[in-house]
Amino acid sequence: MPTERALNVNDFYEFMKQKGMNTTSQRKKIASKFFDLPGHHSLEEFYHIISEEDPSIGQTTVYRTLKLLCEAGFATEIHFSDDITRYEIANPKSHHDHLICLQCGKVIEVYNTNIESIQKEIAAENGFILTGHVHNLYGICAACRNKKADE
């Protein structure tokens, strides 16, 4: 299981080794690219990037590797309002929330200690102990607003 430090592809290789799983060259390419690629990517986006580098890697192999990364705690599945599953590196030291543009799909990671405190306060007031949360804020980004104003 990942530790409380930044995760990297070697941690994933070690996880597979400990579980007796094959670290195939295709899995290595997929995992390496995943850790090198910042942001929130859908299976289709990620597969497109992988297939440009190695057309022999199939979409099913990419999907299974992304699912394995999630099951192992190295990746997180994110679901925004568009019903498309996206994946990001699971970093235990980097909690964040998201601003999502409803027009272009841009995702901005944000962190605010006040929001975190308020969430804990609300949970305590209602007798909850937080084990996690997802906080997504939807709107229209500045670029889309400016583009619309120019039209």
Image: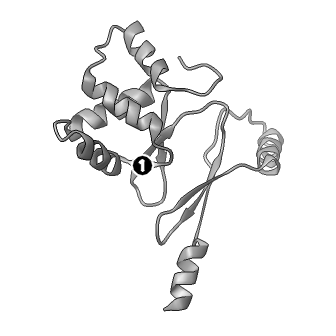
86, 130: nearer the viewer: 86
Is residue 77 shown above or below 15? below
Is residue 100 shown above or below 35? below
Q: Amino acid at mark 1?
A: His
Horizontally, residue 75 falls left or right of residue 96, namely: left
Q: Residue at x 65, y 45 (%)?
A: 96
82, 6: nearer the viewer: 6
Q: Residue 132 in the image: state x and y as whole percent.
A: 64, 36
Circle 1 sits in a helix, a strand or a loop, which is it? strand
Quarter location, residue 133:
top right
Quarter location, residue 71:
top left
Q: Residue at x 51, y 62 (%)?
A: 106
Direction left: furthest residue: 56
Q: Residue 15 in the image: state x and y as whole percent.
A: 44, 15
Q: Residue 109 in the image: state x and y as whole percent.
A: 62, 52
Horizontally, residue 7 falls left or right of residue 135, namely: left
Direction front: furthest residue: 53
Horizontally, residue 81 falls left or right of residue 67, namely: right
Quarter location, residue 149:
bottom right
Q: Which residue is mark 1?
A: 41
Q: Residue at x 45, y 25 (%)?
A: 9
Q: Residue 78 in the image: state x and y as whole percent.
A: 48, 46
